[in-house]
Image (spheres, helix red, strand yellow):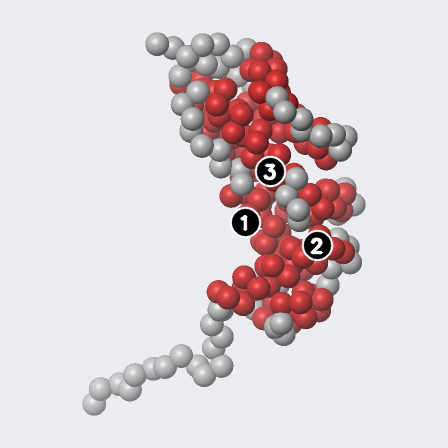
Amino acid sequence: MSEPTRRPPSGAATLRADKTAAIAEAVLDELAEHGYGRLSMEAVAKRAGVGKSALYRRWPSKQRMVIAVVSEPTVALADPPDTGSLRGDVLAALHAVADWLTHPRFSRILPDLIAEAQRDDELRRALALRIGEPRRARMIGVLDRAVERGELPPDLDRELALDLLGGLVYWRVSARGAALEPGYFERAADMALRALDARPRRA
C-alpha cells in the first residue's frame, strides 16, 4: 500500500512579499519620524496594517528588523558603475554617497542610528557588519580596478582611501549641513585623486 501524501501543517505560515514590503515601508517611516529609540514593534505593525506576529515571524527583535530593513536599500545605493576611469568612478561614488545622505528619509534615519550606536555596542557592531562593511567592500572593487589600470599605486592604503572618499561628502552634508553647490563633486574628486597619488591610466 502506498504511503499517503503528506501535506504541510495547516498552521504553517507563508511570508507574503507584499506584507514584508509594507512592513519595511512602515519601519522606515517610523524611524524617520520618531527615531530608533522611540520606535516600537506595535507602532510599526499598526502603520503597516498587520499584527505584531507578522513582524516576529520575520525578525526576532526590533534591532534585527531595523538593520535588515535599512541595510537592503543602503547597500544597494553603494554600487557605483564601472566608468572605465578612476576619476569617473570616484565622481559616481561621491554622487552615490550624496544621494544616500540627502535622501528624504535616510537623511533623518542615518544620523539618528549613528548617534544611537554610540550608546549601544550591539547596534554599532550590527551597523558595521550589515551596512558599513558591505558598502566599503563595493568601493574596494573600485580601487582594485584602478590599481590594475595603473591609475593607483599597488601599495595603496585602501582603508585610508575609503575613509577619505566616504568622509568628503559625509562631513560636508551630515556634519556641517553645507550645500553641495555646482562644481563641488568635481573639485572633491580632483582633490581626492591628488591625495591618493593617482596617475594617468596605462596605455
Mark 3 to mark 2 CA distance (whole Å): 18 Å
Looking at the image, is 202 positioned above or below residue 78?
above
The mark total stands at 3
Q: Which of marks 3 and 2 is in front?
A: 3
Categorize mark 2 by other alpha carbons within 10 Å: few (<14), some (14-19), many (20+).
many
Quarter location, residue 66: bottom right
Q: Can residue 55 be seen in this view?
A: yes
Q: Which of marks 3 and 1 is nearer the N terminus?
A: 1
On the image, the x and y values in percent for residue 26 come to 64, 61
Residue tagged by mark 3?
99
Mark 3 to mark 1 CA distance (whole Å): 15 Å
Query: In what quadrant of the picture does the N terminus appear?
Result: bottom left
Q: Mark 1 belongs to which amino acid?
A: Glu
On the image, the x and y values in percent for residue 116 come to 76, 47
Residue tagged by mark 2?
31
On the image, the x and y values in percent for residue 61 come to 65, 61
Q: Mark 3 belongs to which amino acid?
A: Asp
For residue 72, which numbered disc appears in the image? 1
Q: Nearer the viewer, mark 3 or mark 1?
A: 3
Q: Mark 2 belongs to which amino acid?
A: Leu
Categorize mark 3 by other alpha carbons within 10 Å: few (<14), some (14-19), many (20+).
some
